[in-house]
Image (cartoon, grey):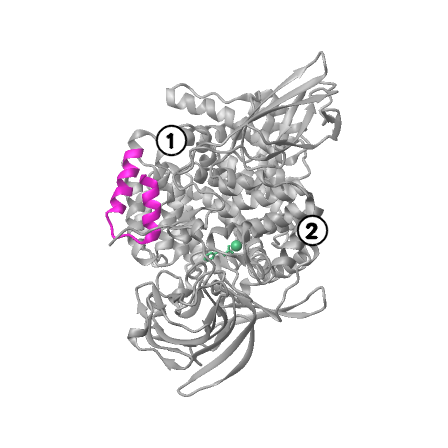
Amino acid sequence: MSDPQPVYLSDYQPPAYQVTHTELTFDLDPTATRVKARLTVERHASAEQTAPLVLNGEHLTLHALSINGQALAEADYQLTDETLTIPNVPAAFTLESEVEISPSSNTALEGLYQSNGMYCTQCEAEGFRRITYYPDRPDVMATFKVTVIGDAQREPVLLANGNPVDQGTLESGRHFVTWEDPHPKPCYLFALVAGDLTKVEDHFTTMSGRNVTLQLWVEQENLDKTDHAMASLKRAMTWDEETYGREYDLDLFMIVAVNDFNMGAMENKGLNIFNSAAVLTHPNTATDAAFQNVEGIVAHEYFHNWSGNRVTCRDWFQLSLKEGFTVFRDQCFSADTNSAPVKRIQDVSFFRTAQFAEDAGPTAHPIRPDHFIEITNFYTLTIYEKGAEVVRMLRNLLGWEAFRRGSDLYFERFDGQAVTIEDFVGCMAEVSGIDLDQFMHWYSQAGTPEVDAHGEYDYAHAEYHLTLRQRTPATPGQPDKQPLHIPVSMGLVGTKSGQDLTLTLEGEKLGKDAVIHLTDDEQTFIFTDVAEAPVPSLLRDFSAPVKLHFPYSREDLAFLLTHDSDGFNRWDAGQRLALLALDDLIAAHRNGVEKVMDSRVVEAFRTLLTSSMDDKAVLAEMLTLPSEAYIAEQQPIVDVDAIHAAREFVRQSLAQALRDEFIAVYKENGTDEAYAPTPEQIAQRSLKNIALSYLMSIEDDESVALCEAQFAADHNMTDVRHALTLLVHSDRADLATPALKAFGEKWAHDPLVMDQWFTIQVSRPQPDVLERVQYLMQHPAFSIKNPNKVRALVGAFAQNRVNFHRLDGKGYALLADVVIELNRLNPEIAARLITPLTRWQRFDEARQQLMRAELERIKQEPLSSNVFEVVEKALA
Ligand code: PHE
Ligand code: ZN
């Protein structure tokens, strides 16, 4: 077998044939579902008369094929494992086919599959070709009419996109429903669901006064977990009307929860399908973080109705066109609904840890890649989150009003079309008159730009000279980079006044908060009339996705931590201060020298804890130390043990020095109110729980008593899970074992809670974790076929840095074993799971060798194209 080959953006050709209307009939059966397709096909005006019709199709058994009612003989077409080619076709015709597929043996969860006995589909990106022969590409858009036939007992509910237009009973206990979707769509937005489901229903009146029925379909036992998603959906619908002027366009909007799902959720037209973890919540089973996640994902999928469905992507290289824009939209929605600074802090904190690592590793790719082997490998943090950062920069460059006009123009001009990133950015340039040519490099260059900043205050002339230099490191296939257009939002904070100074640049007064534009390799900005020596506050609100280096002293950082008017940078100053202290401690650990805590960090924390900051949510973030993963990102060679030891030392030192303050914060922020995922309650719980974390790092009797009491009070999952985690991560088996057991027994019936139970145990720092993972993989609640379970157990283990990176290599071997097994069952999940092994360059020689050896071992297998692509890159 030859190696899978990449496809290139530069090879794009418009389709020779369009499908304008698609009629499908599904006769459902677990092992032998029959799919009849009737396609109205037209040759594209620009295509050659002799152009063959080429359809995609995989894992299909063809039973019948005809053109304009005329059956085709085997000699009339060619069939391969991946395509059906018909050489001689008229300019316009009807193609009919009948194929057979087996949903019950579909473990890849692409196409039509079964989950808990129910039928469901996942077609993005290229899953539709596992359902029927079709031009499976987003620039082929058709109206759909779909009839689903199922067993009236086993599948009382039969759903597809659009509106139900017919239904009836058939012989031998079968029944059918017919659905029509009037909006032309690419086949990746097709969906079907059939099973024994119940619904909750609600209504929404759109801004033009139309009544939309909202339905959330779940299994019976989950009916009490739907309130939050439904409320979130209605808020998202209102927000998109008010913020972007976008109204829903069908009479019915459905969400279905399924247990087996590769991703978070999917924006199928009028019929969103959700991973149950991304939609179901209950105060007793879901944490605050889960509630917020559900709100964000429900909104994200809903927003796709415009940014993705009404206007879609021409080809999969343009994936960030819909994903970057939609993530930006959901981020703004969540910011508006909750605490805006905390949302930004959390997003950036995650981004700088995970996306920066991706951008620095062997799978680094631009927001718009120019080639790929397997598109499912490109649903990445780069496409999604960096894509969103780039859209955010556009919003900031244009200002909200012009950006909104650009968005309106984009939706109006391209409604019903499949378009490119140029089309989107072109609208932004057109409405604003801003030249965005250089800005386009953000879409084509991989790698995180590094900005080195250097500043000098000139007392004699009352000037501040700020020099910025940029460079983007080489990434695979891209040795040389062009300078980017980097908007740097900034202020100068006067060291005497503690206030933002007015910025005057080249004679122009810019106000106290300005954006300067770094467009060359190096530029010096001279601010005049600077009355006092300032500390610069740079990259406010993380105005560009770059690494900013400025030689701040610890005094500068302590100053910014309390004086910066930008909440994000106040937080970031604290992170930088902690990182400097951690650096020293990591070095001390490596050199076997006694560790000494930096008193400036202690004093900064004392100030935070006692200064009655009114934004408790931000305060909780400021009290959170950089994660081990983020600390690792800052190190030239990652020393997992030193990082862990240094961070634990800081936690314990802070807890010892500030024990009474943490106890006070803990006690002040308890609440007996009924649980609600409101920003106020969430802020209180975060603050209380972060205090408890510090206290449990010293495990004195009072702290342990507080923690056990919180666990026993069983008030809501946020508090219970937090307490349980602290107990289980303690060295004391007498704390860990009974709590874990009680929790596991209580929730044995609830898969989403059992996922949390798995994750908590395998995130322990203690060295018994590897054996525990092996043991839990045999647990009845675990299944390798369920992506949530794999993520909760194996994925979480690979995030447990001290244990995954064991020096005997057993952590790596365990992961590789699972990858090898999943390569056969679910290649998409297998390929994702390898990620931690692909980062081998970041570690010491011994670990590098062990990690590479596992990658080599995987490579010996007969690989799916998904795993092949990742392993090839990782070993290149
Ligand atoms: N398009 C989905 C989203 O971001 C993600 C997804 C991709 C889901 C591929 C399934 C398969 O909203
Ligand atoms: Zn999306």
Q: Quadrant of residue 766?
A: top left
Residue 875 magenta-highlighted: yes
Quadrant of the frame with the N terminus: bottom left
Task: Return the residue found at the far bottom.
Answer: 171
Q: Is mark 1 within 8 Å of ligand 1?
A: no
Element type where label 1 sits in the image: helix
For mark 1, does the 10 Å Cα neighbourhood hold few (<14), some (14 to 19), or many (20 or more) residues? some
The location of residue 506, given as percent across then percent down, is 72, 24
**Pointer 1 residue:** 641
Name the secondary structure under disc 2: helix
User: What residue appears at the point 47 percent right and 70 percent down from the top-left corner?
Assistant: 192
Q: Sort mark 2 into few (<14), some (14-19) or many (20+) by Cα contacts within 10 Å.
A: some
Relative placement, left or right, of 516 versus 26 is right
Is residue 646 among what the camera can see? yes
Q: In the image, is residue 601 part of the stretch drawn in magenta?
A: no
User: In the rendered image, which quarter is residue 797 located in?
Assistant: top left
Q: Which mark is residue 590?
A: none
Residue 258 drawn at (x, y percent): 46, 64
Task: Write down the region rendered in magenta.
Answer: 848-876
Q: Which residue is mark 2?
A: 405
Q: Amino acid at mark 1?
A: Asp
Between disc 2 and disc 1, the foreground one is 2
